[in-house]
Image (cartoon, grey):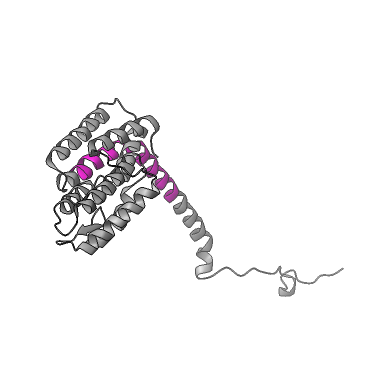
Amino acid sequence: MNTQNKTDPSNAPPTTAEPAGCAAWAPALIAGGALLGMLFFISCAGGTYYLFQQRGEFALRTIDGTLIPLIEQSRLEPDDKATTIAELRDFIVRGQSGELEDWQIAGVMQRLVRAPIVSWGDMQFIGSVIAQRESFTDEEKVAFLRDLSRLQRGAELDKVTQLEMADIFEPISTKADHESGYSLDQEFSDEGLREFIARVRLVAARAEVPEKQYDVTLVAIVKRQIAAGIKSGMK
């Protein structure tokens, strides 16, 4: 019978080395990272849900705190400025009263931002500059103002947006950190105005606006966008 000492090291089971240093903390770090990731996801989801729930209020604040001041500071003619702002304030009252749902209010704001509201006063101003330009013939003035009205008609039909304004005004402006993306020059050369009108004509043609004179008001565009946003939401 084998009486070998059971404490003989040769018979001891193999031992496993304990992890040292960073390796010892790896499982805890992985678990902690996963937990933080879950918390971040939950936090973001909660924040997104909150913003989604409050989108109507944010939209009204944007119209009241950003869009209306921009109109007030614009070159828009006084009567047009007053009627347009009154229409926007009436919409704000409707939104705050609970008459409209959040998706409707957000839809209206998105459509108003897309419309060339910020640049409307600049269109009117350049129109007056062209009308008084002695170096342009009467025939040129009629043609230039007609094309400008076609651009405004394209905006009324929702085929011309604010995003196109910076490029249209580029020949008579400089880039600026402004909602419009540009700042009108102090003086305008004949060549710059002709290039401006050429771009106006191009955009109006792309919008398939017939070549005739139109009488378009900004308040009509605002009313149209409000009605469309209430009916269909965002575009």
Question: Along the horizontal axis of the image, is 214 left or right of 73?
Answer: right
Residue 135 image position (x, y, % from top left): 16, 60
- State which quarter of the image contains the C terminus: top left
The residue that appears at 18% across and 44% down in the rendered structure is: 71
- In this view, which residue lies farthest toward the right? 1
Name the spot of residue 4 as percent of width and height, x first.
Answer: 79, 72
Residue 146, position in %: x, y?
26, 46
Q: Position of residue 225 (x, y in %)?
A: 31, 36
Q: Is residue 54 visible?
A: no
Residue 64 is inside the magenta segment: yes
The residue lying at 50 percent from left, 64 percent from top is: 25
| Among the 4 quarters of the image, the one containing residue 229 | top left
Residue drawn at (29%, 48%) of the image? 147
Magenta stretch?
39-68
Work out whether residue 101 or residue 219 is closer to the camera in this orientation and state it: 219
Q: Nearer the viewer, residue 46 or 134?
A: 134
Q: Is residue 133 above or below residue 8?
A: above
Asked if one can make out residue 178 in the rendered structure from this viewpoint, the answer is yes
Residue 76 is inside the magenta segment: no
